Image (spheres, rainbow, N blue to C red):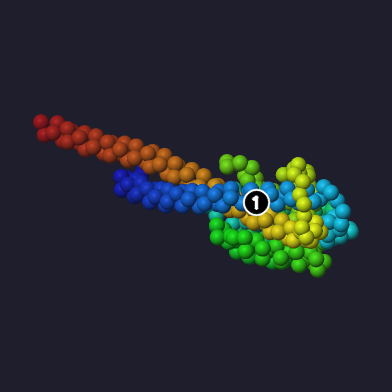
Amino acid sequence: MATKRDIKNRIKSVTSTKKITGTMEMVAGAKMKKMQQRLSKSKPYEEKINKLMANILSEGGAALEHPLLKGFDDPKKALLLHITGNRGLCGSYNSHSIEKTLQFKAKLESEGKEVSLYVVGKKGINYYNFSNIAMYKSAVSPEDKFNFEGAAKIGSELTSLFMGRTFDEVYLSYTKVFSSSSQKPANLRLLPITLETAGETGSGSETDYYFEPGKEQIFSYLLPLYLRVKIFSCFLESGFSEQFLRRVAMKNATDASSEMIRDLTITYNRVRQAKITNEIAEIVGGAAALE
């Protein structure tokens, strides 16, 4: 049976752990709110871009012949951009994302496509290195510091790879936010841009637009912008999901520490009471022996 000293040291250790997890919970909560605000501010802009795209595409014409929209016949090479985190202690965020990405990669390969990985985030990079899965490119996740300039840079890079026929298709694997308390891994095709993706907020638009200088010129500007906005939104959603799950994980750890401290305190009091009782019994026994 553990001594009072052992139990007391254990209580001290768990209390220190509780302070750390409690602090991490508060930090994750603050970062989560920041990401949620950025995501809320970016959504109206994304929705307006989608509506403009849907309006132009619904009328057909020369816009449908744009290279970013038309794509290539019989695509064989695909690039999969996978967003993960740099750190752990965020529940199943990274493991679920990697699992779903590998399933999607296997699906594309079953269609006869050669799939290359573009991995963002140390956790994803470490996993693929450990599993000896080759990566086309890797980068550290910018986490909550990701900005629109970063999205523009990635969008331009992916567009160049697509237009140069290095890859026939470009996909993105991320963690999609369905509600403030529900996030799940998801996959979408970035290039070529599909009618369904571009008009995902609704097919067509009830508003009539007059385009100046012309629909084709505006569409040529709008497509790269749409791609950058979509990448930016996916990074924000992944960042929010990571911080949300980290806050939940740290809260569970803090609650478990509190429960453990309570149980250890009860055990300590029982050991202490048993020792006092034993000492009293020894005193009584000694007094009886002297009589």
Q: Residue at x 52, y 52 (%)?
A: 34
Q: Is residue 97 left or right of residue 9?
A: right
In the image, what residue occupies the spot 69% across and 66% down? 137
Secondary structure of the residue carrying tag 1 is helix
Quadrant of the rendering where the N terminus is positioned: top left
Q: Quadrant of the C terminus?
A: top left
**Residue pictured at 81% horizontal, 50% vertical:** 57
Q: Nearer the viewer, residue 139 or 46?
A: 46
> x, y percentage for residue 197?
76, 49
Q: Looking at the picture, tell me which residue is in the foreground, 57 or 251.
A: 57
Query: Dot 1, how many residues are within 10 Å of its Cα: few (below 14), some (14-19), or many (20+)?
Result: few
Front residue of this view, candidates 85 and 52: 52
Q: Quadrant of residue 149?
A: bottom right
**Amino acid bearing label 1:** Tyr
Note whether residue 215 is visible.
yes
- Name the foreground residue: 224 vs 8: 224
